[in-house]
Every structure is written in C-alpha cells, then in structure tokens.
Image (tube, rainbow, N blue to C red):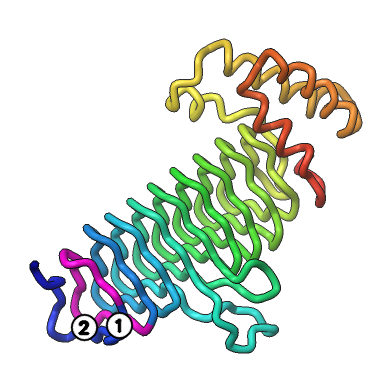
Amino acid sequence: MTEPRIHPTAIISAKAELASDVVVGPYAVIGDGVEIGAGSAIGSHATLKGPTRIGQNNRIYSHASIGDDPQDKKYAGEPTRLEIADGNTIREFCTLNRGTAQDEGVTRIGSDNWLMAYVHVAHDCRLGDHIILANNASLAGHVHMDDWVICSGFAAIHQFCRIGAHSFLGPQVAMTRDVPPYMMVAGSPPQPRGINAEGLRRRSFSASQVRNIKEASKILYRQGLRLAEARDRIHKLAEDQPELEILVSFLDAAERGIVR
C-alpha cells in the first residue's frame, strides 16, 4: 500500500485519517479528527480542522480554511462537525465552518460543487449537489441550498434562507427571503426576473417542461394572487407535471416568505 503523498513541510496530526493516495501540499495543516477520502488533494497552506469528513476526489486549493470553529458567539467548544461529500472543487481562501449545537451540529456540503475563491459557507449550512458559488459569495448560518444553484459573485445570503434547486442569483444580491426553485433573482433590492430557462435547457429539461415551469412562475408572480392561492393552483398543475413537484414542496415548506 502506498503512503499519502505528503510534502515534508506539511503538518499532519496522528489523529487524522488520509486515504493512501491523498496529496498534501507544502505547509498545509491537517488537525485531529480530519478524514480525507481517496483521490483528494490538499493545496499549500490550506488548514483543515476536525471533526471534518471529506469524501473522495475533492480538490482543496491553497489557503482554504476547512472545518474551523463556527463564527457564532453561542459556540462554546461543543463537538460539532463538517461533512463534505465527493468531487468538489474548493478554491483559494474559501472558509467552511463546522456546525453548532443550536442546529444539528453539522455543516453539510454535497457532491460535484464548485466553490470559487473567497467563498464563505457558515455554520449549519446544507448544500446539495452541482452548485456553483462564484467568488466572494457568502452564506450565513443555517442556509439551505438545493441542487444546481448558481450564485454569482459577491452575493450574500441571510441566515436561515432557503435557495431552491436550479435557481440563479445575480451578482451582489442580498437575499433575506427564500428563492423558489427555477427562478432567476437579480438587482438591489433583489427581484425575480423570470425562470432560469437556459440553465434548464443545459440540464436536458424538455421544451414542454420549461414551458410548464414558466407558466407556474407566471401564476406565482404575475397574476396578482396571494401566495396561498398561487400555491394551490400550482399544486393542481403538479398532478400532471412532475417537474413542478419540487416547486410545490418548496412552497409548502415556506416559513420566512419568498422573494416576490
């Protein structure tokens, strides 16, 4: 069995667990309770603190801070953790914090996500799969972000917000409310700007599915309906249009209000 390819200047805790083919660059620091899966690479000067579990084929670039304490004044050293799945790219100077005891005690990152330089993911966030967070995007604590979201540079998401699947957030938006699936949001203050039609086509949604999603968005945003009325109409459409089911589920769970 081959040993992990660790640069001699790297500092690796005896209580860390690295797969045999993990690459660790110069001056990286990997602390107690860090687990790193096969095929992953840790860049120079990156700092990883546990308890943190990192899956397979992740690429963490230089100066990233992964799994450090949550930036929460209530945090008092409780044993919380960070979990990162597979195939993620985490670029320079990203900061990903562990969870807090006030939530489930874990921050979760899914698979095949691309986090560009200086992205911040705070405590207790939950990210799905295939997400792109552009440079300097910042997620406050307890943010939930579903699959295939694209978040432009310098976007800021308020704590406890939910960002629905396939949505697109424009540059420098400051989100304080939930964003339903499929929607594009831009401007200051943020406003819905239609559906993410091009993104859906790139993900092989059919023309009829895109059309159905567009009609549902018109019910939600252009017919002057109360949210409950719009939700009921979309519920009925979803019976024959399964692509609307994630929109229905999202609206059913809405608690803090949606961008509208």
Give the crowd class for mark 2: few <14, some 14-19, many >=20 residues within 10 Å. Answer: some
- Image coordinates for residue 86, horizontal then vertical, percent: 35, 53
- Between the residue at mark 2 and the residue at mark 1, the CA separation in whole angstroms equals 6 Å
Report the span colored magenta.
17-32
Which residue is under mark 2?
10
Residue at x 72% of width, y 40% of height:
191
- Residue 50 vertical position relative to residue 216 in the rendered view, above or below: below
- Residue 28 vertical position relative to residue 175 in the rendered view, above or below: below
- Direction from residue 147 to residue 248 in the image, left or right: right
Assess whether residue 22 is covered by the magenta stretch.
yes
Give the main secondary structure, helix, strand or loop, of the magenta stretch. loop
- Secondary structure of the residue carrying numbered label 1: strand
Q: Nearer the viewer, residue 157 or 42?
A: 42
Residue at x 69% of width, y 60% of height:
158
Assess whether residue 221 is covered by the magenta stretch.
no
- Residue 186 vertical position relative to residue 142 in the rendered view, above or below: above
Q: Residue 79 lies in what quarter of the image?
A: bottom right
